[in-house]
Image: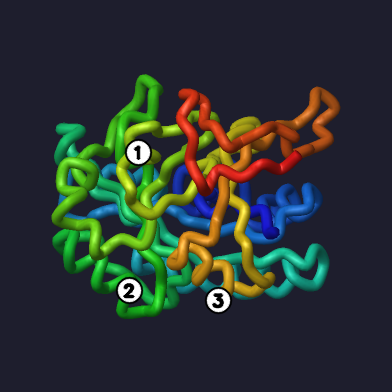
Amino acid sequence: MILSDLHIHSNFSDGKHSIPEIVDFYGSRGFGAIAITDHLCESNTMLGKAAAYLERTLTEATFPLYLEILKTEKQRAWDRYRMILITGIEVTKNSLSDHRSSHIIGLGVTDWVNADQSIEQILHSIRNQGALTIAAHPVSTRKVEKQTLHLWDRREELAPLFDAWEVGSGPHFFDEVARSGLPMIATTDLHRFSQMNGWKSLHHSEKSEAAILDSIRKQEVSFQLYQETKDAIPFPLALDLFSDPYGNRHPNLASTA
């Protein structure tokens, strides 16, 4: 099984660390796959323009360099750690209203995506590249922060266009997603290394980018609560994860003991 974290932000958007620093951080902890998924904000809204001014988003000008560094680090991650590095984005459509805000992760992207398009157009743009579409933190994150509820409000309509929905984000497990019957994935949404503890995914697949992405499509994944010791030595908690934190049993929450 391959331990992954497929929602990570670097200093190309609002993350604290560089891509090489992230590769070394996860590689030294034995992860089999990670994805850098920096924000790609709208360019024609007030919030999107503010993100660009503050350098908290990818732009058409910075995207080629982003791809170039990811290409170099992809090879280094494999050579040094035998870790898969997946190129990703988080298309970010923020609004003053939580119910009009949505974040969409694209895993395995190769080309620029215009965030000013409609939700449907964005999802088709990502899939047309052969990449996966993930609904990021689609329900309440259980934290005092901006919420992104638009995708969940439209889940029945949009479900055919998504490959998975985040059921775990950081330390929080989303019971309503787990109960929905929708395909799922668990990630960290990491912006700084102190946020490392939380839910991760295990892929029942070969160690290649194509196989890992396919395991999400086929839902050959399970979820694991990851914790680091006080001495910063990482270890996956050997817990019975057939039950989630709410006491509900799910077939894809596998025991790792």
Q: Amino acid at mark 1?
A: Arg
Q: Residue 52 appears at what percent x and percent y?
A: 33, 50
Q: Nearer the viewer, mark 1 or mark 3?
A: 1
Q: Judge left or right: residue 162 versus residue 218.
A: left
Q: Judge left or right: residue 129 versus residue 44.
A: right
**Residue 58 in view in this figure:** no
| Picture residue at 44% right of the left edge, 76% below the top | 110
Work out which residue is located at the far top of the displayed protein and give it.
144
Which residue in the protein does label 2 denote?
127
Disc number at residue 210? 3
Q: Is residue 237 above or below residue 43?
A: above
Q: Is residue 116 above or below residue 224?
A: below
Q: Residue 207 appears at what percent x and percent y?
A: 68, 70
| Picture residue at 41% right of the left edge, 48% below the top | 55
Q: Amino acid at mark 3?
A: Ala
Which residue in the protein does label 1 denote?
179
Q: Are marks 2 and 3 in contact (CB under 8 Å)?
A: no
Q: Secondary structure at mark 1?
A: loop
How crowded is the residue under tag 1: few (<14 C-alpha within 10 Å), some, or many (20+)? Answer: few
**Residue 127 in view in this figure:** yes
Distance (Cα) linking label 1 and label 3: 28 Å
Distance (Cα) linking label 1 and label 2: 26 Å
